[in-house]
Image: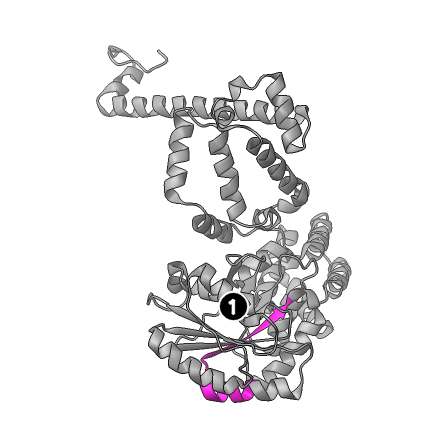
């Protein structure tokens, strides 16, 4: 996500930091490079021009030119202006009684998948706390895409996966408004409080599509009309957003496929061009790879400053506390085996693609390619899966013949199997030593509390000794 833009921005900052003092000339030169980088990232030309003008105005101010560290001040200005360009703060959903959300967009943008992802997200307590109140949300999915073959079945499958009820019109139904009226009656019987309407798309915006959506809006009177935009389409996403907003009066946007778009210019252009906030972002194909859009966090990622808050939130969702407690206890008493190590790897994988996780770490741009890390995790998992349960539990029994069998079964070399076992042994030894050190520190603290601290005072009898004395 934004890899090319991020790389060029960081090169610019590095160049600016090389100057002890900044002048109008070197600032203008740097901003010219940034402008080209924005246009190369598919940012709308008018948005790029306005952004550069705002940054230059602030960068030429006395607070920067007279600063002790002007390079750092420039980075701060870029972060502020990028955050503002992306919308400032996260904008919550407008909830009602019940809440009705219309999902609109072109074919292939990800409307049906985004509908299910949003339903799943609304069931998470963390979302209630950050987005208006703590009332439990009980979402329902309503299939109103009567055009695309298998759209209804796709939504039904996703609904079953996340355990959310789905309204399914009959295959012969062609009247969207008639189906919507039945859906309204159905939703009252379900007792839910959030209705998500997945509507039909087209390859291009046409009068039939717009007219159908306008009539549907008048019938269901939604609190939210969210346009799903494919980030990979670049400037087309901006044009589509403008046309949908003019016809329907959008309340927000969902940006999909951010994980696969190296340029990402659509994200930087949509808010400025339409005036509507990006409320959610799809960061992967899986149903759990969907999150509220936080402009400040994304700005930090683009500038290579990481996003620790999102990383912690994702870890809290993916990792089960009970499982972590069990693994921690096994680490402490040195009973941690390769099966437990495999469980840890799978926890990491549940958090999402490794390249996304690395993007949340400050300075991750200086690390080796995320693809390298991802392949290494796959190799380790394949090697461990090629072992028997007994071998995972007792790796010391792995003789030369067993290692050759594991190498063949996992598609790796014996050297790679040996490297894994060596690193695992070192990690286990370190964990064992750490456990011993914690135990000694605990003993030292308890003895100090009971008077053992006197052993450190001169001319006092050393009745209490530390473990290593």
Placement of 68 over or under 344, stated as above or below: below
Asked if the stretch drawn in magenta spans residue 252, the answer is no
Q: Position of residue 227 (x, y in %)?
A: 57, 75
For the N terminus, give its image quadrant: bottom right
Q: Where is residue 382 in the image (x, y as percent from the top left)?
A: 60, 35
> Is 116 on the left-hand or right-hand side of 51?
left
Query: Given the current orientation, which residue lies at the most extreme front position?
Result: 172
Along the viewing direction, whichever of 367 and 444 lies nearer the viewer: 367
Q: Give the quadrant of residue 188.
A: bottom left
Along the viewing direction, whichever of 258 and 20 lies nearer the viewer: 258
Residue 281 appears in the picture as rendered: yes
Q: Name the residue under label 1.
A: 155
Along the viewing direction, whichever of 342 and 86 lies nearer the viewer: 342
Q: Where is residue 199 in the image (x, y as percent from the top left)?
A: 55, 77
Q: Residue at x 72, y 66 (%)?
A: 42
> Is 380 on the left-hand or right-hand side of 183?
right
Asked if the stretch drawn in magenta spans residue 223, the answer is yes
Residue 97 appears in the picture as rendered: no
Q: Which residue is drawn at 38% across and 82% down?
A: 185
Instruction: Name the image colouring.
Output: one colour
Placement of 400 over or under 78, stated as above or below: above
Q: Residue at x 25, y 19 (%)?
A: 452
Along the viewing direction, whichever of 358 and 190 lies nearer the viewer: 190
Q: Please report the bounds of the magenta region as a residue range.
A: 213-230
Placement of 377 over or under 66, stated as above or below: above
Q: How crowded is mark 1: few (under 14 residues within 10 Å), some or many (20 or more)?
A: many
Say which element carries label 1.
helix
Q: Where is residue 150 in the image (x, y as percent from the top left)?
A: 58, 70
């Amino acid at each position: 996500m934004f890899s090319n833009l991020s790389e060029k921005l960081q090169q610019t900052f590095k160049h600016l930091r090389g100057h002890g003092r900044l002048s109008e000339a070197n600032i203008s030169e740097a901003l010219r490079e940034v402008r080209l980088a924005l246009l190369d990232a598919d940012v709308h030309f008018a948005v790029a021009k306005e952004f550069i003008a705002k940054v230059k105005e602030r960068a030429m101010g006395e607070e920067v030119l007279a600063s002790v560290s002007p390079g750092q001040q420039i980075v701060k200005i870029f972060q502020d202006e990028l955050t503002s360009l992306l919308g400032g703060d996260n904008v919550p959903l407008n909830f009602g009684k019940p809440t009705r959300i219309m999902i609109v967009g072109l074919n292939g943008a990800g409307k049906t998948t985004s509908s299910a992802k949003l339903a799943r997200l609304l069931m998470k307590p963390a979302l209630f706390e950050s987005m208006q109140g703590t009332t439990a949300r009980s979402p329902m999915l309503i299939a109103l895409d009567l055009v695309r073959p298998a759209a209804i079945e796709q939504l039904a499958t996703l609904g079953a996966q996340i355990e959310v009820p789905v309204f399914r019109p009959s295959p012969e139904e062609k009247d969207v408004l008639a189906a919507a009226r039945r859906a309204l009656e159905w939703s009252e019987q379900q007792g839910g409080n959030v209705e998500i309407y997945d509507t039909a798309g087209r390859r291009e915006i046409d009068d039939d599509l717009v007219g159908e959506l306008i009539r549907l809006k008048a019938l269901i009177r939604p609190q939210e009309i969210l346009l799903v935009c494919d980030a990979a389409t670049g400037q087309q996403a901006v044009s589509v957003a403008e046309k949908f907003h003019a016809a329907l009066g959008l309340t927000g946007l969902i940006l999909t496929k951010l994980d696969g778009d190296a340029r990402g210019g659509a994200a930087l252009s949509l808010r400025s061009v339409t005036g509507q906030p990006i409320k959610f972002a799809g960061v992967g194909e899986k149903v759990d790879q969907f999150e509220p859009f936080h402009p400040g966090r994304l700005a930090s990622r683009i500038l290579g400053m990481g996003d620790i808050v999102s990383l912690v939130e994702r870890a809290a969702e993916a990792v089960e506390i009970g499982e972590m407690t069990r693994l921690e206890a096994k680490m402490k008493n040195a009973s941690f085996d390769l099966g437990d190590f495999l469980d840890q790897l799978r926890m990491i994988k549940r958090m999402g693609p490794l390249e996304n996780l690395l993007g949340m770490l400050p300075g991750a741009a200086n690390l080796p390619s995320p693809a390298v890390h991802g392949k290494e995790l796959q190799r380790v998992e394949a090697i461990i899966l090629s072992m028997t349960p007994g071998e995972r539990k007792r790796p010391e029994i792995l003789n030369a013949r067993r290692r050759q069998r594991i190498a063949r079964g996992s598609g790796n070399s014996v050297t790679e199997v040996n490297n894994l076992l060596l690193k695992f042994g070192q990690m286990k030894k370190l964990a064992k030593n750490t456990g011993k050190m914690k135990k000694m520190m605990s003993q030292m603290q308890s003895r100090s509390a009971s008077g053992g601290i006197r052993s450190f005072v001169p001319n006092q009898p050393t009745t209490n000794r530390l473990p290593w004395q």
